[in-house]
Image: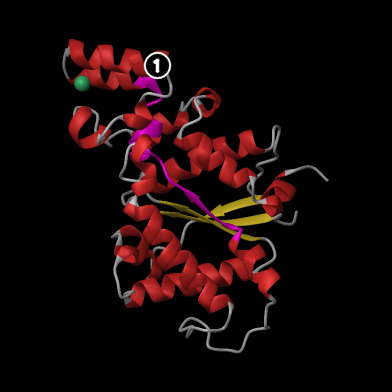
Amino acid sequence: MEARARILVLSEDSGDQAQPTIQKLLKEALKLVVEGADLNPKRIRLDPLPENESARKAVRANQWKERPPTRETILLLGRIAAQLMQSTGFVVFHFDTDRVWTERHESENRQKFEEIIREGVRRILRGEAAQPIDPRPRPTLTAEQIEAALERLIILSPCYSIESWLYQATKELLEYCRGRHERDEHVRLIESWSANRALLDDVLKPKDDVLPCVADHHNEELAKTFPAEDVWFAERSFFESVERLRSCSALVKALGYE
Ligand SMILES: [Zn+2]
């Protein structure tokens, strides 16, 4: 069975839970993009960067936001460009918006992603930048091919952070909170998030300031019961990311049945 999509999944979160968490959320998103999508891992491959690859450091330690780009970021840009040059290659890049939904347009992270990552990859695809990974000459791409490749670089950018999505698994979240303490204020808050799925996107620092009792200790478990469809209907940052995936026609085609 041939892979229809090879998706390089990058997450700024570190730790053992980061990849399974983001991959699970991504799969839920893909199921909303194409209903009944066949996510057989042989057809739709989701892969992290190998543990030993230096480019991985640039994503994890938030190095990619630094100017001028570090050596690791330059390697990362080359890696992303190489992925996008494959006809079945996609890159999904998760970073937190670090802003609540109503202030998302002021997100420095989103601006830096466009300026440093997307623009950096565009320069490589145009042949304007050195490529330390593979110095061999590459076939010249037309402007149209370059933009088509860049469409396959898609961001997952939750407001405020990845926990803003994960905490939507309110039933399980409540159990974790109650396991730590009896705090009526937390119970009321979690119940309000369950009743209105739009609220969490406007909560500032949910992990560090709002529910330090749960923090990010159970991210992988929470991802397993993420109520994707309900959250999508709320039309906040998860919806926005799903719609970004949907606007990539090559991805929709890869997910669809023949
Ligand atoms: Zn609590």
Query: Is residue 41 in the magenta section?
Result: no
Relative image position of residue 29 (x, y in whole percent): 56, 37
Q: Position of residue 19 (x, y in %)?
A: 42, 48
Quadrant where the N terminus is found in the figure: bottom right
Q: Using the image as rendered, state which of residue 221 and residue 68 is in the foreground.
A: 68
How many labels were placed on the picture?
Answer: 1
Percent of width and height locating residue 49: 46, 62
Residue 162 sits inside the magenta stretch? yes
Write the residue at 72% across / 50% down: 254
Q: Give x and y (percent) for residue 236.
A: 46, 32
With respect to residue 7, does 56 lie above or below?
below
Looking at the image, residue 134 lies above or below residue 188: below
81 or 66, nearer to the observer: 66
- Quick check: can you spot residue 96? no
Residue at 35 percent across and 54 percent down: it is: 109
Q: Which residue is mark 1?
A: 194
Q: Is residue 28 left or right of residue 225?
A: right
- Check disc 1 and report its element: helix, strand or loop: helix
Label 1, ligand 1: CB separation under 8 Å:
no
Q: How was the colour assigned to the protein in this rendering?
A: secondary structure
154 displayed left or right of 43: left
